[in-house]
Image (spheres, helix red, strand yellow):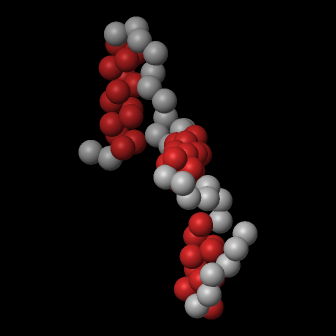
Amino acid sequence: MSITQQYFLDAYRAAQHGEPAPPAPGSHDWQVARELRDHRQFRAVVAGHPAHGRIRETLTRWLHGRRVSC
């Protein structure tokens, strides 16, 4: 069963029971991506690492073989 078929089945069941329909698939994807980014930044700060530019700094260090200070 695809995600769309599951959504329609859940919406049908909710309508039969007089409950609100579930959110459509993909309607909260951007919110989840933002929350994941915020969580990763939070974990970096708690661990004592910079919250921004970690990947770029690592790639620059790897490509140029030197330490880049921000």
Quarter holding the N terminus is top left
Asked whether 32 or 6 is in front, the reply is: 32
Q: Is residue 3 above or below residue 11?
A: below
Name the residue rendered at 59%, 66% in the picture.
54
Q: Residue furthest right?
A: 70
Asked whether 46 or 21 is in front, the reply is: 46
Asked whether 44 or 1 is in front, the reply is: 44
Q: Residue furthest left?
A: 1
Name the residue rendered at 40%, 25% in the picture.
11
Residue 12 % position (x, y) = 36, 23
Name the residue rendered at 40%, 8% in the picture.
18
Horizontal arrangement in the rendering, residue 14 relative to residue 50 (left or right): left
Residue 8 % position (x, y) = 38, 32
Asked whether 63 or 15 is in front, the reply is: 63
Horizontal arrangement in the rendering, residue 14 relative to residue 55 (left or right): left
Residue 42 in sight here:
yes
Residue 28 % position (x, y) = 54, 38
Name the residue rendered at 61%, 59% in the picture.
50
Q: How many marks?
A: 0
